[in-house]
Structure formats: C-alpha cells, structure tokens
Image: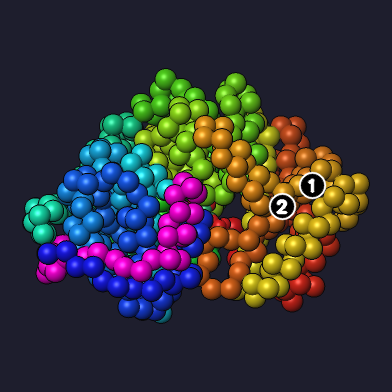
Amino acid sequence: MTLTIPTAPFLDQKPGTSGLRKKVRVFQQPHYAENFVQSVFDVLDNFDGQTLVLGGDGRFLNREVIQTAIRMAAANGFGRVLVGLGGILSTPAASNVIRKYGAFGGLILSASHNPGGPDEDFGIKYNIGNGGPAPEKITDAIYARSTVIDRYMTVDAPDINLDRLGETQVSGMTVAVIDPVTDYAELMEQLFDFGAIRELIAGGFRLSFDAMHAVTGPYAHEILERRLGAPAGTVVNGTPLPDFGGHHPDPNMVHAHELFDQMFGPNAPDFGAASDGDGDRNLILGRNIFVTPSDSLAALAANAHLAPGYASGITGIARSMPTSGAADRVAHALGLPLHETPTGWKFFGNLLDAGMATICGEESAGTGSDHVREKDGLWAVLLWLNILAVRRESVAAIMAGHWKRFGRNYYARHDYEGLESIAAERLMNELRVALPALPGRTTASLTVAPADEFEYLDPVDGSLSRAQGLRLLFEGGARIVFRLSGTGTSGATLRVYLERYEGTDGILDAETAAALADLVAAADALAGITRHTGRTAPTVIT
Ligand code: G6P
Ligand code: ZN
C-alpha cells in the first residue's frame, strides 16, 4: 500500500560536484534522505515500470538508505530495482549495470573519498540512463524541488534481505539482489588482455593494490588475485568497512602513505595502486615513482591502443580544466581533439555519448573511458597493467620516455582545507575582481599573461556553465588555477593548481616541488592566500 507522508523542505539539499554530500548526522534527520530521494523522483518523467539501480560503497548508513529507497521506488512506480549484494556497488560498476540492463537510472550512495562512520560523511547521487551522473539541468531541478517538497511516497513493507542473491517482491515491484562484481569483471575482460597480464604476473612482476577498506576490495580480489593470478596478499585492506577502518579512503600521498612508503622503500614491487571509497578514483605508482593523475591520463591516452578494447584507436581526449595540459600534447601529436571541461565527471557524459572522446581524466585522480559513464579506478589499474604487459618496461621508464616524446608538465595541487567559507569566498571574489588588471604584472619572476574565469559551453547540448575556476596564465606557459571545492561537507576548501611545462629538450627529471617553487610564491602574492586564510602552507599536496 502506498503511503503519502507529509514533510517540510530542508534548504541545504543542493547537489555539489558529485551529488548531495553531508554529514551522516544530517542525513539521519527524520525525512532528510526521503526528501532528497523523492525530489529526484519528482523531477524524472516516465519511469513507470522501469528499472532503478541501487548500490553504494558500504559506508555507514548505506544499508538503511537502500531499504528506504527500495520502498520509495516501489511507491513511486518503478517496476524493478537492481541492488548489489550487501548493498554494495562501486560507482563504475553501478554505471555499468545501468547501461547493461537498460535501467532508467540509478542511485549511488557514497561520499566518495570522504571518511565514513557515524560522525563522518554520506552522500546520494542520481545517475541517468547513460550510466553517468545527472547533468546540471537535472541536479538544479532536484535542488529546486527539494526547496518546496511537501510529501514523499513510500510503501508499508519490511526490509529485504540484502545478503542473499535473488528476487523478492516489494508491493508489486521486483527487487533483484545481484552480484556486484560479475558484470564488471566481465567488462574488464572484454577491454583488456587478461592473458598477457596473467603472463606478466606469472613471470614475477609484483604488484600491490590498496583497497583502503572500501568498495574495491571484492572487485580487486576477484580480478587481480583470482582472474589474473596475483598472489593472495596482493590486495591489502580488501574488506569494505562502514568506517573504512577509521581512515580517509582517499588514494593520495597523505592517506595512502603506507603504499607510498612501500613503493619508495627497499624491495618495492613493480607497481602499486589504490582506489577510493566508491572505486572511481585511482592512484598509480611505480617503483620510486608517483604518476600524477594528469600524467597518467596522458600516458594512458598515448598507449591505449596496446589494449584490445582500444586497439582501433581513440576518438578524442577530454580533461577537466584544472587538469594539466599533458594530455593536450598527446592529443596534438596523435591528431585528436582535446576537450576542456569544468571539474566534475558529469561534464564528460555528453562528449562520450556523442563519440567525441574515448578517454577522459581529471587531476583529482579520476580516469576513465567510454566503457561506462563514470571514472573507474580499477579500469585505470588494468589499462596500466595491460600496457606494462605489452611494453615490458618499468613505470619509470615509460614515463621518462613519455616526457622525452611530449615534454613534461610539472604539476601539483595545493589544498587548503577547513577554511571559513567567508574567508575563502572573499579571496576568490577579490581575485576575480583583480583579474582584468593582472596581465603584464610580474611576481616571483613570472609575468601574468591572460587571466580569466573559466566557463564551458557544452558542444553537444549547448548548455553554459559559468564560474568554473579562476585561471592565471603566465608568459612561457605556466598556469595557476584557483577554485573552491564542490565536494566538501564542512567549511571551504581552496584548491590551487600549479603547472609549468618543460619542453622535450628541457630538464625532465627535476623534483616537482622545486620546479614549481616560484609558482607557489606567485600564487600567494597574487591571491593573498595567507592574508585571507591565515595559512602559510597547504593541508594536502597532491
Ligand atoms: C568528485 C567528482 C570529480 C571531481 C572531484 C573533485 O570526485 O566526481 O569529477 O573532479 O570530485 O571535486 P572538487 O569540487 O572537490 O574539486
Ligand atoms: Zn570516488
């Protein structure tokens, strides 16, 4: 029986870069999750009898919100829900399930790389029928709806058993609990030469994968250890935990420092990788080398043809604006279009659907292709392994050869986390106002060339996205970008992206920090980071 429950709007349900993310305590308020889910359903049309995909990264509150969403899907007229066993689906696996089974869309429950647990973060994101995050016109509509919502619909039905595969009926709707790994592993086998990777590993190549107690554990155990024959123990922290073992499931130098220590220590394996809470990010390391996400995108694009799924070549490359220009060099050399989009995977969806790009990537540790409509951590790991299996060179040698061929974009991102929102906004506003006067000004021996605020006109649907980051270009090709993060759940995070290009005959093996030192000084001088925030150093450098 359908129940219509009266409710009152919450005014803070505006989706950010990637869905609605809030503290668990916020989501635990009566009707909070229900309001958001109903706002999603209210802005969608014609899903009667259709399929909804449901799954999350297993974090605290995952199971409860899944049960709530199942009842609401039944009440709102969906015909079927596909939900991952235990409520688990990695973000890329959910994208694949949506596409493979022709679902109307999906709800992915995750706050990505943010920590989990009763005092930490939770999130809900809606993905459309192409498997990708809802575009802004839908997320804007969801937000608008959430500000006026006055009722939600649910049914009076017990929880379903999420821990047993198979079908159950919930008020006339079918709920199928599916294995979260099988479809995804099959897709990976189609794209990559598992035989070649198996041989590489059998020949003594050693790798380590840190699943960070997050969603990729079951996927990595199955693919790396069972299907590719890597020895047990290759996957570490492979059991998903609701609080990720108390850590941030964020694959970077700070939160994956054990992997870094291992890869830069004695007896390091040949390859090290990690993924985040919901499995869409990746960290790539070789022995004594960290491959920045921007460089990884460029190297993967340059070598993708070595994997069966991309043997006939790629149609184009897309990167978010703050991502370095390394991929641009590859696109140029291969005669391919390069698309520059705002931060957020949702902006790649139209390009991928239109066949205008095959490979996409972001500086925030996301890389992926047109096989799904999300970034995909294990996909990046497997493409690297496929390339390594064919080239039989070390990661360091592949990157050295890459820079020799294309030049090197020295790159770093400095994050200032936990700022007061007012201070962060004042910094951005002042800089925005100052932009027109900056060209020609020299600071820390760098002269500002054009400076602007990035906006994006989607070439497929014509939509315009404004205010996507302040860019300062310098004579000689260096660049600093300033942006406020759209994924935080408390205070503000200022991101400062620093980049300097060194040509093929330049110094290609400098330390990144040294190569960018004058840009760091210029960033502070031009934007007044210390003056506005009181900080003299970033919280995290990636
Ligand atoms: C999420 C999105 C990415 C985005 C990243 C950083 O992971 O899926 O597309 O690049 O957040 O966003 P932020 O707004 O925090 O810089
Ligand atoms: Zn993620």
Q: Position of residue 391 (x, y in %)?
A: 45, 30
The residue depicted at 45 percent of the width and 54 percent of the height is 141
Residue 141 is a magenta residue: yes
Splitting the image into 4 quarters, where does residue 522 fall? Answer: bottom right
Q: Is residue 452 left or right of residue 456?
A: right
- Residues in magenta, as a range: 135-162
CB under 8 Å between discs 2 and 1: yes
Check residue 359 in the rendering and tell me which mark sits there, or answer none: none
Q: Amino acid at mark 2?
A: Leu
Which residue occupies the foreground of this view, 145 or 66? Answer: 145
Q: Residues within 10 Å of mark 2 (few under 14, many from 20)?
A: many
Mark 2 lies on residue: 470
User: Which quadrant would the N terminus be assigned to in this image?
Assistant: bottom left
Quadrant containing the C terminus in the rendered view: bottom right
Name the residue: 10% across, 55% down. Answer: 172
Residue at 50% across, 28% down: 356
Identify whether 281 is placed above or below 540: above
Q: Is residue 372 left or right of residue 102?
A: right
Q: CA distance from mark 2 to mark 1?
A: 7 Å
